[in-house]
């Protein structure tokens, strides 16, 4: 039973436009959410995170939005660049409950089109 | 700069062999993780360790065991390798709860069992 769901396996976006990647979760104990980016043959690299006490966190071109009532978060990338083509993983943990396991979704492959 | 180092980038092993995947981190992190990544399945947690000699099963522990004798080293053991354990294996480390933070990944080990 998946606790973190990324329902879009892939997404194509024109260079310069906004990329929106979505993620849903089922475990109401999750209180910390992360996005990772992964290129082929490399380990995932951390992109941005958000605590459940916030509903938005911004870092340069990347913004994560959290809707706790809907158990939904999204990653916005604007403007999208060719180097953003990668697999993006949404992840969650329940740190307030001292459960440090980080649970990942299946990932969304983002293609930035020239 | 955090470094998580996995001992091999590529491994080929025979069915039935005992396989050791080693991971070392240099940031004095309490938590260490082993994941496997498979197409369409994302990153699945195999085992998690929150302290020396402490471990917790993740979502797919069957066929695997782990060892954490020293804080910086976390080993994944395939007791008797099978072809369905052919995968990309990713090790990660992170600080313990109370300090919401990301996990840092190694570069991955692509294991092929023939």
Image (cartoon, coloured by chain):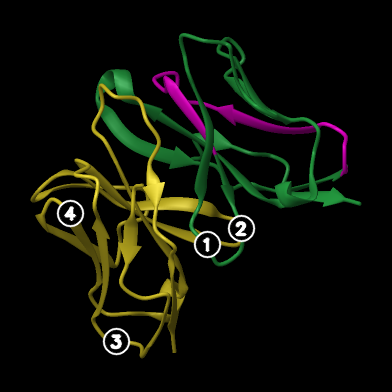
Chain colours: A green, B yellow
Q: Which residue is mark 3?
A: B16
Q: Chain of mark 4?
A: B
B73 left or right, relative to B16: left
Real-space Cα distance between discs 1 and 2? 6 Å
Q: Residue furthest front?
A: B1
Q: Look at the image and say whether residue A16 sits in the magenta stretch.
A: yes
**Mark 1 near mark 2, Cβ–Cβ under 8 Å?**
yes
Q: Which residue is mark 2?
A: A39
Q: Which residue is mark 4?
A: B72
**Callout 1 crowding tier (Cα within 10 Å): few <14, some 14–19, many ≥20:** some
- The tag on residue A42 is 1
Q: Residue A55: give x, y in percent of width and height.
A: 58, 11
**Callout 2 crowding tier (Cα within 10 Å): few <14, some 14–19, many ≥20:** some
Q: Is residue A44 above or below residue B79?
A: above
Q: Residue at x 59, y 37 (%)?
A: A5
Quadrant in the rendering for residue B14: bottom left
Among the two numbered marks 4 and 3 on one chain, the one whose residue lies closer to the N terminus: 3
**Mark 4 near mark 1, Cβ–Cβ under 8 Å?**
no
Q: Residue at x 23, y 32 (%)?
A: B96
Q: Which residues are magenta?
A: A14-35
């Amino acid at each position: 039973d998946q606790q973190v769901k990324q329902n879009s396996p892939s997404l194509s976006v024109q260079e310069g436009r906004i990329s929106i990647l979505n993620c849903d979760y089922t475990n109401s104990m999750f209180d910390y959410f992360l996005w990772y980016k992964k290129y082929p043959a490399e380990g995932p690299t951390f992109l941005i995170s958000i605590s459940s006490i916030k509903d938005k966190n911004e870092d340069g071109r990347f913004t994560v939005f959290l809707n706790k009532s809907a158990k939904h978060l999204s990653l916005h990338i604007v403007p999208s660049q060719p180097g953003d083509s990668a697999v993006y993983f949404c992840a969650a943990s329940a740190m307030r409950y001292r459960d440090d396991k980080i649970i990942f979704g299946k990932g969304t492959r983002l293609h930035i089109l020239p | 700069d955090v470094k998580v180092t996995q001992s091999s980038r590529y491994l080929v092993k025979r069915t039935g062999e005992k396989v050791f995947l080693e991971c070392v981190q240099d940031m004095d992190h309490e938590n260490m993780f082993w994941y496997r990544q498979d197409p369409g399945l994302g990153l699945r947690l195999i085992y998690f360790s929150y302290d020396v000699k402490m471990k917790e099963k993740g979502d797919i522990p069957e066929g695997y065991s782990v060892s954490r004798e020293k804080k910086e080293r976390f080993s994944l053991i395939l007791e008797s390798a099978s072809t369905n354990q052919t995968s990309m294996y990713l090790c990660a480390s992170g600080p313990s709860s109370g300090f919401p933070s990301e996990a840092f990944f190694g570069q991955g080990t692509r294991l092929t069992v023939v």
